């Protein structure tokens, strides 16, 4: 066997041919086991260990080295498919990087050959793509350089331009490198990959651009760039170290001028010119950092990667700024390894004498981004290519780890600028990181990760400003695809590992996308190969396909593309299907612009039902419409296309739904200084910590208003108007003392602009103006909790519009507290109706004020108006006490109940007995019903005085006396007779058999008589008067709205 001898190499043709044999194994053709020879790196030597892989279970076991392989395929781990799992994975009919090392004579006979032939035919184009012997070098098996005496493997650290923006940051980086190299006992051979100084690449690009128009200006721009680098260098090192480096930098500047001098003449910038010029930023940066290290006494040297790293590049130019794509750039490992060894033999002698056991170590500062071609032409690894440089050198040096130093504490569950609750992920699989990177997360590009995947080198992402934090580690492959998809149900050990994974690891997005849709009723008649033709047209036009979905009927196909390529994609498809359009076989090819793609990613979703449902429900609750859905075949990624303006709300909704963060609800409180608002704010504050701890739920007050002022949370205040959890509750009046004038239009715009998916307005006013905004808020996805009865008992047509708006906007309208305060009256009624029972009648008392007054009134010691005065003092009454006495308050509650029963009832349809004398009912009282408590109490006292002056006390004493003669008591109650659709509110004489007889002070009571509750009614009874209970009902409505299922509109 060729692979049994590590020094033996197959020719390229044999390797390419037998790669298909290994892929045949992946297709499951009668295999029980595949033997693997895993070449594992050791510190000082390379050893070969034979392993056997059971292809059905995915389990590897150590094999007897002397025993022959059990089956026909013997795989070498030279590149090993990033790991053995990929030996079993087919992508477009081809296995990735698999090298089979047994002769074709040992393949299964006729049946297997037929399968192999079919596979070779499907994968022919893939074989051609790999047919470059220079690229398909054997993997680097061991470090080409290793300091004599070093007891630890190399470690590679990468620093971007943001970490090297000024002299102080260079010091921070240098000090960190010295600590990492020698701070853990034994010295660690260390390489630092550095980008250009922050902003330097843009300055050098500016030099090139200026040279097209004005060479003198290009000289000025270049001198500014050089001066900035030298100024930083001079702050870091003494003149004897600075001098030689300054000379080299100035020589480089002259070379740059020589290169750009002709650009004005040719009126264009060759790609190689841009790459040569911008590469000097890294060269200067590496020398600058090395100067500081030498100043600190470190054993260091700088490495010009152009002298070591040899690549094959199929693309030109730098790529787009901010991109992490290195597509088209492939390292040539053989020449690179040879050059690294040459560099070390010439420059590494001083590092051989260090006492690594005592913590001494060498530090190599290498230029990122730059490389050279096999022909010696300078090139780059494209924008953000320094990450790729780091992983290439990590593989080249057989490093123990790579650390990418950023300005964040690792890879976050989401972009913290858009999802404030995002937090660092502890660990990721390579596959998860690649999915996150593809969908826009600033991690690493998949191609930049490949060198570390090949040799299973862990990648750490850490914070340069918080080095004590462990950050995120990226390592290991996801074996779930093979187990779950190729061989049926995953084995127990795979299921056990999956159960330990969180459902998702992160959420990310591609912000600017367009959806290109080709559709037509006649597509199905001749649509074979439709997807192939669409993708081929896009490839020819150079358009990247981000997502693809196709209807099962083949009646339409939609492709998500970058927003800048939407029009180009449409033209390419229309040209490809020009004949079909001319024959009207297709209806249209359209482009939907202004879209974003949101993706959830995590290995835990594999074989876990409900992941898609959780995402879709979260987006529904956030009022986010989905334009396109796609799930990766690996099950570790689900992506949806949404409107760009909804993307942040979608990210937050998904982040909360998958419990990556607590559920946050932003609340605006109207009537904050009224009796309910004053009580509600402290209740919310008192429960803040417990809700967050026990229910993973946060209520954040973002707006508070009274009748004339409004306070809106500053975007920089994460805690909201209530402040931090451990801070005391602020008084509502203090919140509004210096607030802006109330403007409901401005408030509405503020609420609509809030990207948090869960937004609620608490309306504790009775304002008709506020009620007019309900429809708009609900259609915008803003839920409403209202103890106010203005809408629920108001005009029926408005009630219907508001209910419809709630259904349309996906928001909720909660008004349980408008009827029974904290008693579950409406919820119970809904339960009765939805379980199939039929309500015959409902009667009771829904006024805690009137229950108190009639219970206290005895005709002797306490007059009727005395009882009213006590109710006012206790805070039981409505803001305008006349609403209680006239029966209007209870009548409104009756209307709400009747409408829940399906009755078409208006307020005027309720027969109401008023206890108010006409003179008092029609009188005007200043501040009665206002939000200022003191002024309102004075106005209520004036009402009571006028009532005392009337005949009300005498009338009520007489009624009470008559009732007592018959053994009855007076109660103010209501009745809804469902068959006749009659509703009434009146004074009732209740005997001892009536549930109202034992009604206590400030209690409410509702009795349901139904087909099931015949012998005795279903009774709900309890205290309901007072701001504290009413506010508790509002709070309960709020919690039910955002945490529980909901019956209501």
Image (spheres, grey):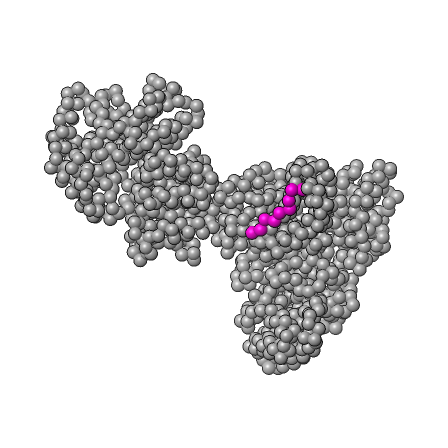
- Point out residue 476 in the picture as x, y percentages from the top left corner: 65, 50
Height in image: 432 above or below 186?
A: above
The secondary structure that dominates the magenta segment is strand
Q: Total label count?
A: 0
Find the residue positioned furthest to the top: 1015
On the image, which quarter does residue 449 sit in? bottom right
Q: From the viewer's perspective, is 388 left or right of 659?
A: right
Q: Which residue does the image show at 75% across and 53% down from the upper left?
A: 79
- Point out residue 1033 in the picture as x, y percentages from the top left corner: 34, 38
Stretch of the chain drawn in magenta: 586-594
Residue 189 is one of the magenta-drawn residues: no
Q: Which residue does the image show at 30% across and 33% down from the upper left?
A: 907
Q: Which residue does the image show at 35% across and 21% down from the upper left?
A: 979
Height in image: 372 above or below 133?
A: below
On the image, which quarter does residue 450 sit in? bottom right
Q: Is residue 734 visible?
A: yes
Residue 587 is one of the magenta-drawn residues: yes
Q: From the viewer's perspective, is 260 left or right of 765?
A: right
Q: Which residue does the image show at 59% across and 52% down from the upper left?
A: 513
Front-most of residues 913 and 65: 913
- Point out residue 852 in the picture as x, y percentages from the top left corner: 22, 33
- Point out residue 833 in the picture as x, y percentages from the top left corner: 41, 26
């Amino acid at each position: 066997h060729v692979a049994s001898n590590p020094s033996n190499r197959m020719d390229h043709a044999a390797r390419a041919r037998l790669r298909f044999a290994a892929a045949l194994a992946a297709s499951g053709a009668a295999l029980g086991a595949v033997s693997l020879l895993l070449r594992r790196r050791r510190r000082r030597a390379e050893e070969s260990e034979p392993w056997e892989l059971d292809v059905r279970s995915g389990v590897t076991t150590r094999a007897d080295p002397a025993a022959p392989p059990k089956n026909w395929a013997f795989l070498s781990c030279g590149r090993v498919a990033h790991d053995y799992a990929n030996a079993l994975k087919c992508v477009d009919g081809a296995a990735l990087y698999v090298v089979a090392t047994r002769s074709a004579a040992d393949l299964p006979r006729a049946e297997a050959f037929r399968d192999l032939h079919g596979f070779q035919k499907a994968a022919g184009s893939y074989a051609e793509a790999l047919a470059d012997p220079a690229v398909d070098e054997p993997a680097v098996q061991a470090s080409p350089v290793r300091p004599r005496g070093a007891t630890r493997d190399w470690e590679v650290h990468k620093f971007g331009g943001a970490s090297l923006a000024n002299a102080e940051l260079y010091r921070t980086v240098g000090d960190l490198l010295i600590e990492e190299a020698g701070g853990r006992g034994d010295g660690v051979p260390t390489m630092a990959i550095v980008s250009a100084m922050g902003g330097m690449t843009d300055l050098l690009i500016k030099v090139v651009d200026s040279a097209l128009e004005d060479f003198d200006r290009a000289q000025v721009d270049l001198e500014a760039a050089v001066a900035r680098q030298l100024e930083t260098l001079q702050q870091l090192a003494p003149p004897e170290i600075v001098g030689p480096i300054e000379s080299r930098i100035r020589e480089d500047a002259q070379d740059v001028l020589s290169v750009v001098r002709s650009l004005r003449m040719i009126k264009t910038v060759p790609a190689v010119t841009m790459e040569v010029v911008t590469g000097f930023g890294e060269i200067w940066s590496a020398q600058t950092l090395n100067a500081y290290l030498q100043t600190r006494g470190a054993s260091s040297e700088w490495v010009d990667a152009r002298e070591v790293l040899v690549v094959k590049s199929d693309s030109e130019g730098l790529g787009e700024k901010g991109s992490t794509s290195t597509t088209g750039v492939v390292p040539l490992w053989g020449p690179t390894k040879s050059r690294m060894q040459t560099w070390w033999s010439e420059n590494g002698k001083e590092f051989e004498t260090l006492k690594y056991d005592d913590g001494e170590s060498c530090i190599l500062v290498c230029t990122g981004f730059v490389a050279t071609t096999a022909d010696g032409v300078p090139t780059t690894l494209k924008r953000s290519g320094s990450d790729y440089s780091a992983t290439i050198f990590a593989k080249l040096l057989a490093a123990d780890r790579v650390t990418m130093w950023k300005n964040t504490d690792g890879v976050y569950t989401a972009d913290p600028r858009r999802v404030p609750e995002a937090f660092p992920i502890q660990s990721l699989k390579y596959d998860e990181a690649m999915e996150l990177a593809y969908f826009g997360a600033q991690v690493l590009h998949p191609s930049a990760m490949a060198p570390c995947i090949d040799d299973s080198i862990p990648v750490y992402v850490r914070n340069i400003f918080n080095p004590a934090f462990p950050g995120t580690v990226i390592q290991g492959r996801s074996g779930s695809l093979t187990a779950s998809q190729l061989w049926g149900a995953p084995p127990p050990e795979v299921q056990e590992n999956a159960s330990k994974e969180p459902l998702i690891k992160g959420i990310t997005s591609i912000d600017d996308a367009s959806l290109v849709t080709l559709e037509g009723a006649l597509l199905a008649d001749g649509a074979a190969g439709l997807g192939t033709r669409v993708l081929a047209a896009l490839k020819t036009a150079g358009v990247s396909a981000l997502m693809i979905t196709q209807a099962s009927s083949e009646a339409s196909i939609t492709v998500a593309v970058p927003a800048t390529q939407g029009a180009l994609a449409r033209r390419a498809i229309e040209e490809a299907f020009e004949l079909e359009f001319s024959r009207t076989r297709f209806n249209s090819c359209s482009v939907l612009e202004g879209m974003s793609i949101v993706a959830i990613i995590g290995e835990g979703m594999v074989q876990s039902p409900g992941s898609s449902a959780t995402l879709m429900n979260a987006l529904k609750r956030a009022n986010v419409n989905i334009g396109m859905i796609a799930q990766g075949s690996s099950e570790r990624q689900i992506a949806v296309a949404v409107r760009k303006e909804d993307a942040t709300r979608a990210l937050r909704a998904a982040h909360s739904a998958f419990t990556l963060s607590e559920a946050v609800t932003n609340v605006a409180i109207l009537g904050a200084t009224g009796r309910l608002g004053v009580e509600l704010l402290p209740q919310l504050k008192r429960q803040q910590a417990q809700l967050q701890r026990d229910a993973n739920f946060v209520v954040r007050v973002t707006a508070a208003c009274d009748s004339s002022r409004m306070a809106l949370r500053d975007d920089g205040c994460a805690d909201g108007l209530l402040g931090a959890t451990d801070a005391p509750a602020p008084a509502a009046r203090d919140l509004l003392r210096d607030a802006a004038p109330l403007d409901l239009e401005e408030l509405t715009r503020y609420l609509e602009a809030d990207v948090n998916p869960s937004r609620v307005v608490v309306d504790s006013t009775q304002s008709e103006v506020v009620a007019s905004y309900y429809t708009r808020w609900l259609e915008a996805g803003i839920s409403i909790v209202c103890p106010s009865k203005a809408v629920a008992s108001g005009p029926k047509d408005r009630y219907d519009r508001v209910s419809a708006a709630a259904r349309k906007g996906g928001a909720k309208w909660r008004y349980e507290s408008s009827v029974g305060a904290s008693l579950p009256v409406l919820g119970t009624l809904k339960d009765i109706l939805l379980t199939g029972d039929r309500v015959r009648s409902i009667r009771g008392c829904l006024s805690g004020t009137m229950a108190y007054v009639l219970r206290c009134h005895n005709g002797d010691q306490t007059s009727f108006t005395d009882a009213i005065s006590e109710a006012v003092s206790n805070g039981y009454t409505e803001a305008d006490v006349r609403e209680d006495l006239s029966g209007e308050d209870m009548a409104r509650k009756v209307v709400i109940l009747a409408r829940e029963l399906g009755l078409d009832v208006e307020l005027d349809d309720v027969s109401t007995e008023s206890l108010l004398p006409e003179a008092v009912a029609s009188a005007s009282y200043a501040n009665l019903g206002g939000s200022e408590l003191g002024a309102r109490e004075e106005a209520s006292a004036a009402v009571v005085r006028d009532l005392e002056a009337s005949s009300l006390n005498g009338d009520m004493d007489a009624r009470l006396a008559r009732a007592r003669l018959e053994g009855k008591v007076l109660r103010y109650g209501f009745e809804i007779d469902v068959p006749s659709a009659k509703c009434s509110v009146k004074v009732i004489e209740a005997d001892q058999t009536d549930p109202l007889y034992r009604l206590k002070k400030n209690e409410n009571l509702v009795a349901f008589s139904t087909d099931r509750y015949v012998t005795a009614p279903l009774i709900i009874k309890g205290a309901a008067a007072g701001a504290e209970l009413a506010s508790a009902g509002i709070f309960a409505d709020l919690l039910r709205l955002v945490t529980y299922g909901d019956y209501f509109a």
